[in-house]
Image (cartoon, helix red, strand yellow):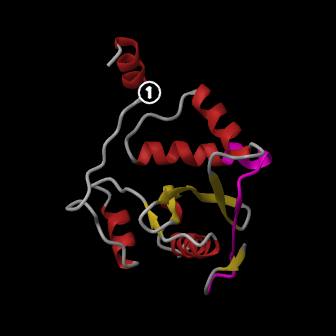
Amino acid sequence: MMLAMQNTGEMLSIRPVTELDADHWIDLVNALADYEKLDRPTPDAVERLKAHALADAPKFTAWLVWLNDKPVGYCVFFETYSTFLAKPTLYLEDLFVHPDYRGAGVGRHVWNALEREVLLRDCGRMEWTCLHWNMLGINFYEKRGACNLTDEWRNYRLVAEQIRERQEAGA
């Protein structure tokens, strides 16, 4: 998807990550990890990310966002399923615009493309999580009408090592 940025003459492009630009995508994944104060993916994880994104049957969709010829952001999403709606849910794992390019409408254009994807896939909803301290993200999402489900739902997580230990213990 190509868009002309309003009043700047710059061209914004949102397209699936390819083998040729996967390293640009990983650079932005690392930038998001830095922003969120998390560890960057290990070299093994980077190889898995690329393999999973570029497989014939990818485990997720990854879009790279270009402003003219510079990669400035990305998003990763996949489908989950709501039995109560009997429709898929588009789950947004990452939406990241490099800090140097925020405020220029890049995030809004990516968001609009994601909303179109929700409708194209006949999803019943889109869901994601946001760190509690990320006020830029929270304000961005709430400005678009998103509601915080914290009072209704709790997020839980088990990591593979915990599961492995439980299985080995026969729990």
Relative to residue 71, is residue 28 depicted above or below?
A: above
Q: Residue 167 appears in which quarter of the rendering?
A: top left
- Residue 88 location (% of width, % of height): 53, 63
- Tell whether 100 sits left or right of 67: left
Report the residue marked by disc 1: 160
- Residue 37 location (% of width, % of height): 37, 41
Q: Quadrant of the C terminus?
A: top left
- Residue 148 location (% of width, % of height): 28, 66
- Residue 84 location (% of width, % of height): 41, 65
Residue 8 located within the stretch drawn in magenta? yes
Check the image and name the residue furthest to the left. 151
Residue 54 located within the stretch drawn in magenta? no
Instruction: State the SS at label 1.
Output: helix
Q: Amino acid at mark 1?
A: Ala
Relative to residue 74, is residue 87 depicted above or below?
A: below
Relative to residue 136, is residue 109 depicted above or below?
A: below
Q: Which residues are magenta?
A: 7-24
